Image (cartoon, grey):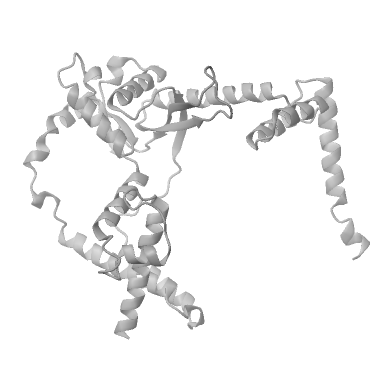
Amino acid sequence: MSRRCLFSGTADFASQVIFLTISMLAFVRNHGTNVLPLILGLFFKISGTSSRVVMMLSNAGVCVSSRTVERLKVRITEDAIQLAINLMTSGQVFFTIFDNINVFLRKSQQRISNTNDMINATNCAVVGIPDVEPFTEADLAEQLALRGQRAKAKATDILPTPEDDKIVGKTFVALIAEMIVAFAPGNSRWKNRKDIAEAVAGMMPEDRPLCPDKSDARPFGLFDVNEGSKKGVVKVLAVIQERSTISEKIWSSIWRIFVGDWLTSNNLRAARRDRTDDINAMERLEYAQELSAPFHFALQATHMIMRTHYGHAVEDPASLAAHKGLLNRKWDVNKPNYAAAKSLIRHSLIARILHCVMDVD
């Protein structure tokens, strides 16, 4: 090994050491010059560095103290909440997404005054919706007039059009072809495989493609409320309105979109049904329009497929139950994990498609 290769990074390393040394000396002399120590202290705390190690590094001037890091986290949280409030009061259309978070605090040695505890909080964020006209009171009145009309709906109201049938058929063929090209045995030895993959990708139809746009999502902080019940959802909506600095009259006069999981939507509908005869629109929750998050659409679809096509491993060797046993998957079928269930469904589908191709050949 040459001397140049051995010491090729010495100059860069020396400059980093000099930079850190200058930062330490400046921080020890004046704690106001803490740009680098503040960043280092924040990342030390995030990485799980113990308090004693952080204290030692702080005394040496490498980073700030744990107390300063906690003040920084509080300041960042307050600024993030203020940015969310600015979005909510700007007049732009937005939706609020929230979900509960449960943290179990386990004590190594329980005492009467120091027992295991559970923190039930609700995490919240606000996401702006660009290029949409702001909602008005007339929109809310029109929406309220439509409530209860689903009882008059007919099957013909949701039938796909012939154009929809064509798009679905082309999409089905394109997805099957994509799986065959991607997972067929020996595909690495195909000639012009890249051209085949590009041709298959071009088979996928496009129906009003949406241009990608950066989401304007802003954290709205935590709430010391458990939203896992009807009362909890009502309380969460109340504290969201209070933190937004918007008055109850203005808040309840137009649509407010709330996004969550199935439990959140179900509890919100049940709470609104129980408050039909309450004193005003705010208490009747007339303004709340519940929607499912995109992830939860996929989660519910996964659960539906598992319940519908699970089958019996002995009676049906092609069922999901048989594939689950072959792959030695141990998770609970009644409440499947999304990633595990999706992996099993996709694996089973690919296996069935390749088996059909082999039979045709």
In the shown orientation, is residue 5 left or right of residue 106? right
In the shown orientation, is residue 204 left or right of residue 164? right
In the shown orientation, is residue 56 left or right of residue 154? right
Of residues 154 and 245, the one nearer the viewer is 154
**Residue 2, image x, y percentages:** 91, 64
Q: Quadrant of the C terminus?
A: bottom left
Q: How many marks?
A: 0
**Residue 37, image x, y percentages:** 74, 30
**Against 194, is 19 above or below?**
above
Q: Residue at x 83, y 48 (%)?
A: 12
Q: Quadrant of residue 46?
A: top right
**Residue 298, image x, y percentages:** 34, 50
Inspect this view and state whether residue 134 appears.
no
Of residues 145 and 319, the one nearer the viewer is 319
**Residue 14, image x, y percentages:** 87, 44
- Residue occupying the far right of the picture: 3
Of residues 210 and 60, the one nearer the viewer is 60
Q: Quadrant of residue 250?
A: top left
Inspect this view and state whether residue 19 appears.
yes
- Residue occupying the far bottom of the picture: 361
Q: Residue at x 93, y 61 (%)?
A: 3
Q: Residue at x 34, y 41 (%)?
A: 293
Q: Residue at x 89, y 55 (%)?
A: 7
Q: Quadrant of the N terminus?
A: bottom right
